[in-house]
Image (cartoon, grey):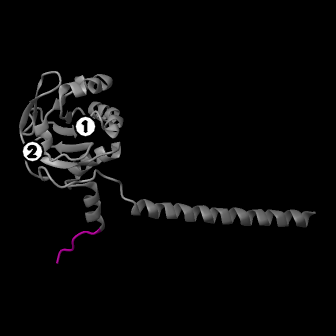
Amino acid sequence: MIEALLVSNLVLWLLVLGLAGVVLALVRQIGVLHERVSPAGALMVRGGPALGEAAPVLELDDWSGRKQTIGGAAPDGRSTLLFFVSPSCPVCKTLLPVLDSIRAAERRWLRVVLASDGARAEHEAFVRAHGLERGPYVLSSELGLRYRVGKLPYAVLIDEAGVVRASGLVNTREHVESLFEAKERGAPSVQEYLAKRKHPRRVA
């Protein structure tokens, strides 16, 4: 009886040690995968003002008739997130609460401007349903042409000096925040910043 109990305990301990080894191996593998998988940033596209160049300066009326200056040095020292949307874009609608959250959390250094084009009547229901009149929300075909916006949702981050620091197609909150990270790191995109860290240039 005692021998059987000892054998069963020995087998149990062997199983526990084996399971611990499997768990440690899994933890190590997860760490390796975490290093290999880079965070997804906004998808950069060609066209529009190049990163590092001055943004076009446009003075536009927003939905409520207030003057909004896009580009140029900001008198209040804040950067501008120019976010292109459309009433017919479902992804844009899912990101509107995200933009509200970002506007509230980052208002000390960031101004969020929503932009679109088309007739005002086409936007009435969209603006009303999502409370966009709190704005700023601007309708301007010229603005979209200047930034060569072909697909939505599209965002451009302009710094306090009026210089384009990051831009790209954005489908998630992580994509939007990657624009801020790119500006902070001084890189065109998060992907390029991570690539430089993994493969630093050698100085002869």
Residue 45 shown left or right of residue 56 in the figure: right
List the residue tagged with mark 1: 85
| Along the viewing direction, whichever of 194 and 142 lies nearer the viewer | 142
* Residue 130 occupies quadrant: top left
Q: Main secondary structure of the magenta part?
A: loop
The local secondary structure at tag 2 comes to loop
Residue in view at x 15 percent, y 47 percent: 148
Q: Which residues are magenta?
A: 199-204
Image quadrant holding the N terminus, namely bottom right
Q: Which amino acid does the dot numbered 1 rest on? A: Val
Q: Residues within 10 Å of mark 1 (few under 14, many from 20)?
A: many
How much space separates mark 1 and mark 2, taking CA atoms?
19 Å
Q: Is residue 54 above or below residue 129?
A: below
Q: Which residue in the structure is indicated by mark 2?
A: 55
Left or right: where 14 falls relative to 186:
right
Q: Is residue 1 magenta?
A: no
Q: Is residue 1 left or right of residue 22?
A: right
x and y, in percent, of residue 57 in the image = 6, 39
Image coordinates of residue 7 in percent, x first then y, are 84, 67
